[in-house]
Image (cartoon, coloured by chain):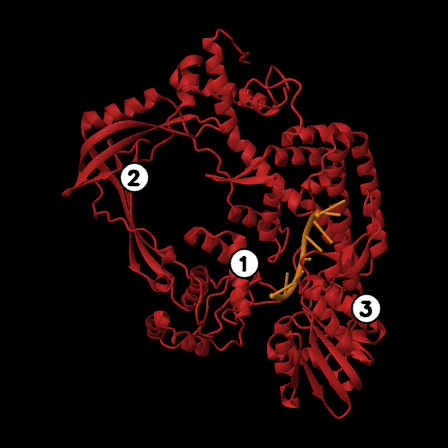
Chain colours: A red, B orange
Amino acid sequence: MKREKAHGRAIEGQGLGSDLSEGSIDNERSFKSIWDLDGRVVVIAEKPKAARKIVEAVFQEYKPRVLRYKGIPYWVISSKWSEITVVPAAGHLYGITTMDKGCPTFNYIWQPIHIAERGAGHAKNYITLIDKVCRGADHYVNACDYDIEGSVIGYLIIKNHGDVNRSLRAKFSSLTPRELRNAFSKLMPLDREMVEAGLCRHELDWIWGINVSRALMSSLVESVGRSITLSAGRVQTPTLKYIVDKVTSRNLFVPIPQYSVSVTVRIGDSNYSLEYYGRSLESREEAYAIAEAVKAVNKLIVVDYKEEVQGIPTPPPFNLSDLQSEAARIYGLSPLTTQKVAEALYLDALISYPRTNSQRLPKDLNYEEILKNISRIPQYRGLISKLFSEIKGVLKPVEGAKEDPAHPAIYPTGVASISLSRISRRIYDLVTRRFIASFAPSGRLLRKTIVLSPLRQGGGVLFKLAGQEIIYEGWLKYYPFSMPKEFQVPRVGVGELLEVVSVKVDRKFSKPPELPSKIKVLKWMESVNIGTESTRARIIETLFTRKYIVEDSRGISATDLGIAVVEILNNYFSELTEASLTRSFEEKLEAIRRGLASRSQVVSEARGVLVNLLNEFTGKKTEIGISLAKAIGLLKPKAKCIACHREVFDEDLCKYHHLALQELWKAYSEWRRREGISTEEYLNYISKLGIVGRWVKELIDVLCAGQSKGRKLSMQ
DNA sequence: GCAAGGTC
C-alpha cells in the first residue's frame, strides 16, 4: 500500500462531477491560518527533520527558540496572541497490541509503540516530550506528511495527548518553503475519513497477520508440541509465494537441446565469430546441412550492412529502489544494507530523504549551489567543472516517470562528508554521481550490424556480426558504472565476399529459469505494488529470519518449510497468498475515505471472513501441523521417497520428485525427436549437465542407480 | 511471538 497523497488529483478527479460532489466550498470556508489561533498551539511533525523544515519555512522571521529534551529538538515561537510549539514525532508512536494469547483474537488496543513492540525504545522520549508540550494547549495542528500514515500518526498523538476537537490539519505535498507556508496559511479541519482509513489499514493487517501466524504456530504446537516462530501477512506471503514458484520451476528444469552453426570469417587481418541468425534449428541434421553448405562455398556474402547511431538516454536521479538495484549490481549490496546506509547518510545530512519513490528533483532546489558545494570534495571537482563547461550553464535535470507526493528523488545536499566507511562512501558516490549525471546530455553509440549468408539471396540461412562504439560519452562520464562494452567491427560493403575460416555445429541447451536475487524480489514487490519503500527490504529479511528462504550460490532458494507454508496458506487462506489482497484493502480504504463505508463495517467483514477460514483450518489442524513438522524435519516420514528424505506421495516418490519425473519424461520426447537417443543415453547425458534442476538431478541419480540394480520406474 | 507501517 503506497503512501499516496490523500486528496490529490488521483482521488478528487475521479468522477466527472467531482467538482460538484466534494465539499470543496465548505473546506475553503473553514481554512484557517496558524496566526488565527490564539493561546497555546502545538504543531506535530512526523519527524525531527520535517519539524525543522516547517520552522524554517513558516516561523523563521518570528525568532523561533530551539529547545531540547533528551536530545530531541523542538521549537517555541511567541507572537502577540499565541505561543506556538513545533514538536516532532518519530513515525508511529502508537501501535496495535493485545493481551490475548489465543487464536482467533480480535481484541486489540492501541498502545504507545515502545510498549506494543520490541526495539521501539526510542519512542518513549518522544512521547514524554509530546505529553509535556501538549499539556494545557488550546489548539493542535497535525503537520505530519499528508498521507494515510501521517494522518494516523498525528491523530493518535492528538487523541492521546491533546483534543481532537480542537485540531486542524496542515496539507502539503512537499517540504518546500512555499508549500509549507501555504499549508499553514490554510489549515484544514482534521481529516477524519483519512484517519479512519489509516486506522483500518493497521487493524486489517493486524487481524490477518496475527491470526494466521498464530494458526500456523498452534498447529505445530498441537500436533508435535513444538513452538517455532512462523508468520504470514498481506505483503510477506505473496512475496514468499513468488519466490517458491520461481524455485519450484528452477528445481524442475530439464534442458532441451538447441542447435546453431558457428562460423568464423576473416575481415582484413582479423577473425570474427558470427552469430547464427537464421530460422531456429530443431535437429542436429538441419544444423549439419547448413554447416556443409557453408563449407562447400567457403565464402559468405554480405547481404546487409547497417550503421546507426543510438542514443543512451540520461537516467533520472535515484529513487530508493533504483539505488538499491545499482548498489546490488555494482557492489553486491543487499537492499536492506543499502537502505540502512542511505538512512545513515540522510541523518548525517549528506543526502536527502532516501525512502522515496520519486525520480524527480524539487523545482526550487538550488542545483548550482549544491554542485558547487560538492565540487569542494576533491574527487568530484574535475567532474563538476567538466559538467559546467559541457552544459554551458544550463542546469536542467532529467526527470523520471515515477513520483512520490511526500519526497523528491535522492540527491546529495552538498554538505561535505568528514569520514565515511567504505560502504557509505560507495552509496554516497552513487547518489552524487547519479545526481551530477542527471544534468548531462545523452550518450551516443555507433552500432554496426553485418548480415551474411552463403547464398546471394539469404534464403533463411543468415549470420550476424554486431559491433558498437561509444561516439559520445555524455552522462556516462559522470556515472561510468553503465559504460557499454565496445566491440569494434570493420566497415564492409553489401555484396562483399568474406573468407570462411572455420565452421562448426554448436549444441546449446535451453536456459534454466533463474533463482531470484533479493533485488529481483524487491523489484517484483514494487511492480505489483505491495509494501512500501521503507518496508520491502525488511520484509524480505523477515522471510530469511523465519527460515522460509535461504541464500544459495545462484540466488534465493526456498526451504521445505517455506514451500510447505505456501502450500498450506494456498489451501486455507488463499486470499493471503495473492498480491490482490492489497488491492482489495485499497478499495475498502478508499470507500472509507469517501465516507461510503465505515472502519467498523470493514473490520467486522474481514473478521467474518477470517473466522470462517480459521474454522476450516482448525478442522485440519493436526494434519497441517504434521505436514509442517515433516517439512522442518521434526517428524520422520512414514514412507521415505527413494530420492530424498521426504514423505512418499506416489510411486515411491515425494511430491517434488514425482513432479520431476513428469518433467523428465515430458522433456524426453523432445530429446528423442531432436537427438534420437535412448532413455538410458538421455538420463546419462543430462545427469552430467550442471543446469538440470535440483529435484530432477536427484531423481536421475536414483533412476540410474536403480537401473543398474535392475529396478525400473514407470516412464509414462 | 505473530503484520505492516512509520522513523531513530
| Residue occupying the point 54% across, 54% down | A336
Q: Measure the C-alpha gap from mark 3 to mark 1.
A: 32 Å
Q: Numbered disc 3: what chain?
A: A
Q: Which mark is residue A464?
A: 2
Q: CA distance from mark 3 to mark 2?
A: 72 Å
The subunit carrying tag 2 is A
Q: Amino acid at mark 1?
A: Gln
Indicate the position of residue A490 as horizontal and vertical percent values: 21, 47
Q: Does residue A319 appear anywhere in the picture?
A: no
Where does residue A126 sit, x and y in percent of width and height?
Answer: 70, 70
Label 3 is placed on what type of residue? Asn
Give the number of the disc on residue A160. Answer: 3
SS under mark 1: helix
Q: Nearer the viewer, mark 3 or mark 2?
A: 3
Marks 1/2 in contact by CB < 8 Å: the verdict is: no
Lower sequence index among marks 1 and 2:
1
Residue at the spot 80% in from the left edge and 79% down from the top edge = A139
Near-viewer residue (A631 or A28): A631
Residue occupied by mark 1? A339
